[in-house]
């Protein structure tokens, strides 16, 4: 199985646009051209990986997700053309029993990596006045659904990134290995911190998570929020994890100013990596560390 012990470099992922962020309110890219421009800003700032959600391309519908395979192909190719060697990490998150769209998009683009949501979470948030921020919902990722995504990623040569929203989900990943649901290599963990009903954005939680993951398995942290996220990023860098931020996860830099692009957010993560005595991995180096093959055009 593959280990990253040989390298101390930090792989930086840019979460470039998010699932529902309104482009009318925030500077999130929607069209292939906009995604290519933002990917280039992130790439120039040190990102080796771009985590991408596809959006509806109709006028006025850019805040809505799209599972159109042609939209996926157009967006991925535009980013690859703009950024030689860029690693694509594709979303697959969808609520409910109908998830053929994400599977179709995986087969259409054959990305190097993709999110594999590793367990279910009550997705909740409460406003300051005591009312629900949105109707309470279940982000359902039962084992049969997880296995369907793992199987298609095996078919497309895609590395699953196991998204862990809570401590129990971290523990489930090892069970997927033990039962033979996932056998390809050491799993790659993504600790998702800062969702209100999931793991908090707290640096003191990181050592516990590291005890619960499989030994030597690569890991990163996705940290969602405002000022509270930045001490977590610095601790991730110090503990040897890989780093992720972008307009999907936050709109604010450490000093509280609003980011008008993914570029400044990625620059800050690169600075944090170097503060921890680590260099930033190039896309080619990141491929080697994660055991990824070179990609071809679609």
Image (cartoon, rainbow, N blue to C red):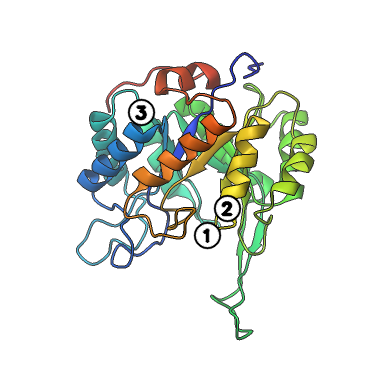
Q: Where is the N terminus found, in terms of image quarters?
A: top right
Residue 186 percent across, percent down from the top left: 66, 24
Q: Residue placed at 42% from the left, 22% from the top?
A: 282
Label 2–label 1 contact, CB within 8 A? yes
Residue 190 seen in the current view: no
Is residue 47 or residue 165 the one in the foreground? 47
Circle 1: element type: loop
148 or 220: which is nearer to us?
A: 220
In depth, the one of 19 and 11 nearer the eye is: 11
Q: Mark 3 and 2 residues: CB-CB less than 8 Å, in contact?
A: no
Give the labeled residue for mark 3: 86
- Quarter where residue 239 is shown: top right
Q: Residues within 10 Å of mark 3 (few under 14, many from 20)?
A: many
* Along the line of sight, the residue nearer the viewer: 274 or 133: 274
Report the disc number at residue 229.
Answer: 2
Side of 241 where 265 appears, left or right: left
Give whichever of discs 3 and 2 has the lower sequence position: 3
Q: Residue at x 36, y 35 (%)?
A: 45
Q: Is residue 11 above or below residue 224?
A: above
Task: Examine the image and state in which quarter residue 87 appears.
Answer: top left
Q: Pointer 2: residues within 10 angstroms few (<14), some, or many (20+)?
A: many
Please identify, in this view, whether the residue under mark 1 or under mark 3 is nearer the observer.
Answer: 1
Residue 26, above or below 144: below
Expressed as whole percent of the image width and height from the top left, the position of residue 140 reads 62, 57
In the structure shown, which secondary structural element does the residue marked by tag 2 occupy? helix
Count of numbered tags: 3
According to the picture, the residue beneath numbered tag 1 turns out to be: 226
Label located before the other in sequence (1 or 3): 3
Q: CA distance from mark 2 to mark 1?
A: 6 Å
Q: Quadrant of the C terminus?
A: top left
Q: Position of residue 13 (x, y in %)?
A: 46, 37
């Amino acid at each position: 199985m593959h280990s990253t012990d040989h390298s101390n470099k930090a792989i930086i992922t840019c979460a470039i646009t998010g699932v529902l962020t309104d482009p009318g309110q925030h500077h999130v890219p929607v069209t292939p051209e906009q995604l290519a421009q933002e990917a280039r800003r992130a790439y120039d700032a040190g990102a080796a990986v771009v985590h991408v959600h596809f959006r509806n391309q109709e006028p006025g519908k850019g805040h809505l997700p799209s599972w159109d395979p042609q939209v996926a192909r157009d967006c991925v190719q535009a980013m690859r053309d703009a950024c030689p060697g860029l690693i694509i990490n594709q979303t697959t998150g969808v609520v409910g029993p109908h998830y053929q769209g994400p599977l179709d998009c995986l087969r259409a683009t054959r990305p190097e990596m993709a999110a594999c949501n590793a367990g279910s979470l009550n997705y909740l948030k409460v406003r300051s006045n005591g009312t629900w921020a949105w109707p309470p919902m279940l982000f359902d990722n039962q084992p049969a659904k997880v296995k369907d995504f793992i199987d298609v990623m095996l078919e497309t040569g895609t590395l699953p990134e196991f998204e862990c929203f809570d401590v129990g989900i971290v523990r489930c990943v090892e069970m997927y290995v033990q039962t033979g649901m996932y056998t390809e290599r050491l799993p790659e963990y993504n600790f998702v911190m800062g969702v209100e009903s999931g793991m908090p954005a707290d640096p003191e939680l990181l050592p516990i998570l590291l005890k619960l993951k499989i030994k030597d398995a690569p890991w990163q942290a996705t940290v969602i929020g405002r000022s509270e996220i930045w001490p977590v990023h610095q601790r991730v860098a110090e503990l040897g994890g890989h780093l992720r931020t972008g307009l999907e996860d936050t709109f604010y830099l450490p000093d509280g100013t609003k980011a008008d692009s993914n570029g400044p957010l990625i620059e800050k993560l690169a600075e944090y990596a170097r503060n921890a005595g680590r260099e930033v991995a190039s896309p080619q180096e990141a491929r080697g560390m994660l055991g990824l093959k070179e990609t071809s055009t679609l």
